[in-house]
Structure formats: structure tokens, C-alpha cells
Image (cartoon, helix red, strand yellow):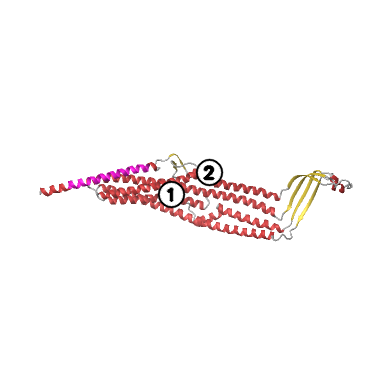
Amino acid sequence: MRRPILLTLALAAAALALAAPAHALLTRKAASGSSASLVLSADTPHAAPSGPALTLREAYALALDRSEALAVQAQDIEEAKARFLDSFRYFLPDVRFRTSRREQDVREGSGSAEGISSDARRRITPEEKFTFTQPIFSGFKEIAALRASGADRRQQRLEYERAEQLLFVDVMEAYYTALESRRDAEILREISDLLDKRLKELEERVRLGRSRESELKSSLADQRLVQADLTEAAERAAISEDLLSFYIGQEVRGRALADEALPPMPGDTIESYADLAERTRKDVKAYEDGLFLAEQGVLSATAGFLPKAWVEGNYYTRRVGFQNGNDWDALLVLEVPIFDGAQNWSGLKQAAVDKEKARLLLEESRRVARREARSAFRSALLSRQAEEKLGEANTAAKENYDILTAEYRLSLVNNLEVLDALRRYQDINRRYNGAKYRAHREYWRFKSAVGDLS
């Protein structure tokens, strides 16, 4: 009876002796993994951001001041103002001062004369005068030009305001992508810490013979996968932070970003928002002004078929000869077009084509605005629902992991079940993080789609 017991103890001692080198090897690998984790952590921006948190509105205000694209569009507005001033040339007189000196060859002995003949034979004839040209009627071109210049200014202003809204969307995308990437890296670090604890606990259990070495290897593989994911998350965070820094003109790496609560969704119907986008969006209204501008182009082209009238006048400050006492003269001109080689017809045809293009662009912009408003409204609603469900799933997955961890210490479940619960918790937590910030992005895309960023 004692002999089988002694034999069993001897075999157990031999097994422990054989397992010791393997256990030491695994311990050294885990230690090297910890050192690799430290090297990774040195390159990974995981320190808590310092300083006052940058809000989305503050980032947008900085981007407005920094954007070169908006500055270029602001110059387009200045050009429109210049065209508006140019339209007054159809109403205001053209005033100039002109001085001239006429010299001619006069042969001696050719006789003399008085009056007109004497002036014609004058060798040097100086003259100084003010000239005036006042338009009276230009075939309604002056009215078309003035109305078109006003529409031109409005169109440029509306396009500028729409560009501001689109810049907000770009800044918002970079802002929430940076927040999402930072939080994703935090989640992975939390999972990595949990796996570190699992490894230490498993090493002790393997040493005591209560767990298999394969379980330790499995946990070690999971830890390496998490570290690889952490590297990718850190890269995404760096890229998104660089993009946000580009927009606002300031470095945001290491700076806190405010994680503000998502405003509630308004309660109107989807069609009401489609109607609102069609009526109020800046780009749609800009296309409306574009159509009005094209209509004035047709009116201006029609003026080529109508008569024109203007007055020309001169006021002389220096005159010689028999007209020396005449200080001014005036000329009324009426010009009626008869045939110009089809130039007017060509201009009118081109203006009509431009008007039709503007009408089609307006119709397309209205349909696009309605489609974008509907699509953005649905995405905003569905993303909130997904965030809510994934939040509940995340809570349940965390509780499940905690329960299985406690049961594992009581040897009620094995290590593989705990690792499976941890993997599931990691996956759901990351999906919830993505859904949360996707809901933020979709909300602001919806606000931009209806043209209201308040």
C-alpha cells in the first residue's frame, strides 16, 4: 500500500521538475512582454491631457480665423462689391480733362485769310477742355446691371456662409475622431491591464498546478493582440489630432478635448426637415440668386436690340481762333441698332442657355438638400438608438466578466471562459465607444444638412 503512494509522489516530483524550466521560460517571456509594453507606452500618448479643455465651438472659432479657403472666398465677396460699383457706370457721367496741342506744316507765302480759313492755316493750335458723357438710355442694361450686382453680392455672401458651415463639419469630424481614438486607446490600455493581472494570476496557478500552461499561452497571445490594437489606436489618434491641429492652427496633442453631452434630437417629422433644408439652406439660396443673376443677363442681352441715347459735352478752358469766346458745346446722340452680324442674337442665345443652366442647378440643389436632410435625420436617429443599445450591452458584458472572474477564483469556471468574456467585453466596449462618437458626428451632420448649426 505504501509503495504505490511513494511511486505517485516520485512521479509528481519529476513532473514538477520538468515543468519548472517551462514555467521559467514563460515567466521570462511575460517579463519581456512587459518591457515591450513599456517601450510601446513610451511612444503612445496615454498621459492625461493637461490644461483647459478645448470645446468644439472654440475649435471652430479658431478654424474660422485660420482657414485660407474661407479667406479666398472672402476675396470673392470683395470682387462682387467691385462689380457692384462698376454697375453705376450706366448711371453716372464720365468726366475727363483733356489737353491737346496740334501742329501742322504751313508754307510761307501761301496767302492769308481770316476766320475759319485763318484757323485752318494756324501752325500751332492748343486746346484744353473738360469732357462730359452722360448715359440716358441703354436699353435697360443699366437696370439689369444694378439688379444683377446686388444678386451677385448676395450669392457670394451665401456661398461664404455655407463654406463656414461645411468647415464646421470638417472640424467636428476631426474633433470627435480624435476623442474617439483617444478613448479607444484608453479602453485597450484598460484591457491590457486586466490581461496583465490575468497573466500574474495564471502564473501562480500554473506554478501550483491549478491551471494549464496552455491557458497562460492563450492569455499571453491575447495580451499581444491588444498591444497591437493599442498601437493602431495610438496612430489613429495622432493622425486625427494632426488634422484638428491643421484646422485650428494650434497643437492639440496633449491638450484636453471637452467631451460634451449630445443635445437632444428635435421632434419634428423627417419631411418637415426636408422642407426646412430646401427653404433655408445657404447653398440653395445662393443658387436662387444665381438664377436671378442669369435672368438679368438675358435682360442685358436684350438691350442690344434697343436704341441707346446719351449726351456728350465739352467745357473749354483754353481755345484759340475764331471760337475763342465759345466756352462750351453739347451733343445729344441717339443710336438705333440695325444689323451687327448676329452678335446680339448670339449674346441673347448664350444668356438664355446660362439661364436654363442656372434653373437646372437650382432644381438639383433643392433635391440634394431634401435628400441630405432625410438621410442625415435617419442616420442621427439610428446612431442614437445603436449607442443606447450598445451602452446596455457594454454594461452587461462588464458585469458578466466580473462575475466570471469571481467564479474563476472559486474554480467554478475555467480560464478560457474568463478570457472569452474579456474578449467580448473588449469588443462591445470598443463598439460602444465608436457608436457614441458616431452619434455625435451624425447629429452635427444632420444640423448641417438642414442649414442650422445653432
Relative to 128, is 427 on the left or the right?
left
Residue 261 shows in this picture: no
Kindly state the secondary structure of the residue where label 1 is placed.
helix
The amino acid on which the numbered mark 1 sits, given as a three-letter code, is Tyr
Residue annotated with mark 1: 437
Q: Nearer the viewer, residue 354 or 450?
A: 354
| Circle 2 residue | 66
- Quarter of the image holding residue 193? top left
Of residues 58 and 102, which is closer to you in this image? 102
Relative image position of residue 322 (x, y in whole percent): 86, 46
Q: Which residue is drawn at 66% across and 48% down?
A: 85
Task: Using a 10 Å C-alpha cutoff, classify the residue at mark 2 as few (fewer than 14 neighbours), some (14 to 19) or many (20 or more).
Answer: some
Q: Position of residue 175 (x, y in %)?
A: 46, 46
Residue at the extreme front of the image, as rendered = 108
Residue range highlighted in magenta: 12-41
Amino acid type, label 2: Arg
Badge 1: few (under 14), some or many (20 or more) residues near its Cα, within 10 Å? many
